[in-house]
Amino acid sequence: MSRSLTTTKAVLNPLFVFARSRPRKSRPRISPKHDVKVRQFWGNAFHPQQQAAPQEQEQEHIVHNASNEGQLDGKPAKSIAVTIDGEFKIFDSLFLRDSCTCPQCVDTSTKQKFFQTSDIPESLEGVARTVVNKERGWVVEIVWTNDIPGYPSEHRTRHSFEWLQRALNVESELRGGVRSDERVLWDRDIITKNNKWIEYEDYMANDKTLFSALTHLNKFGLLFLKGVPDSEKSVEDIAGRIGNLKDTLYGRTWDVKSKPNAKNIAYTHQFLGLHMDLL
């Protein structure tokens, strides 16, 4: 059974603004401190004495090439060592799992994910081996332990060496930049305490309210408006307070409806959680 759902959208900024037409009680004020544990998704050359967890320090890693085809590299672990350009590079298992592009994880038509990053258990561990892929040649295949609930035990993730090298290059570029803002990597507890609700009329008429709303949006990436008139014009008005709307091939605004053979997961019956439109 297909989903019957219509949502009006506009493109402006890769952050979230949610609007409600029904009244809702205000939320607690913003807390000044936010302590969220951040995992590093990849690292430099492998040095067991410096980077490996205590239980992994005695583990030796194989070189990923044709000579070790199909051989598992030690025991499942939260960090996976892959041989790239003659050196061991460390990748976080969560990053490699989140980047899986197999048909069980990514829609073959829309190329969009079936799962949320937050679905991946913290207890996830993986072990790698080198195998041959008919289309991509030699690849690294990862066997998972404590995979996302609902995935079969035979689920595997495959990444080419070229893709892994590109991931390392992107990391190097990001580390070379400077971030001076106060963006918060939040979890459920932090965002529940700091959700911000603003009246539509106040948002539209008061510049101080707008500044407060945009500051919060830049910091948390999530903002709620209440008392929004039930009309498509309201979507344009809300976005227009921030900046000029971008006219796209879809039009100035457009309705998202479920339809067959969709090219975007938003137009299918698949669950669509919080996301960014990067058109």
Image (cartoon, grey):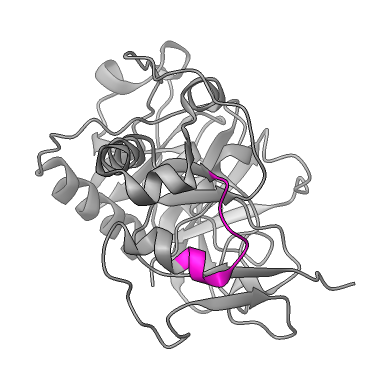
* Residue 231 drawn in magenta: yes
113 or 249: which is nearer to us? 249
State the image coordinates of residue 226 (x, y, percent, origin top left). 56, 43
Q: Quadrant of residue 258?
A: bottom right
| In this view, 213 is above or below 114 | above
On the question of residue 160 being in view, the answer is no
On the question of residue 29 being in view, the answer is yes
Residue drawn at (48%, 54%) of the image: 99
State the image coordinates of residue 126 (x, y, percent, origin top left). 55, 37
Give the number of callouts: 0
270 or 230: which is nearer to us? 230
179 or 22: which is nearer to us? 22
Q: Residue furthest right?
A: 1
| In this view, 52 is above or below 254 | above
| In this view, 182 is above or below 133 | above
> Is residue 174 left or right of 197 when viewed as pictured?
left
> Is residue 12 left or right of 147 when viewed as pictured?
left
Residue drawn at (53%, 23%) of the image: 27
> Is residue 70 left or right of 270 when viewed as pictured?
left
State the image coordinates of residue 148 (x, y, percent, origin top left). 68, 41
State the image coordinates of residue 279 (x, y, percent, origin top left). 38, 73
Q: Quadrant of residue 143?
A: top right
* Residue 91 drawn in magenta: no
Q: State the quadrant of the N terminus.
A: bottom right
Residue drawn at (78%, 48%) of the image: 152
Residue drawn at (42%, 88%) of the image: 249
Provide the residue span drawn in magenta: 226-235
279 or 232: which is nearer to us? 232
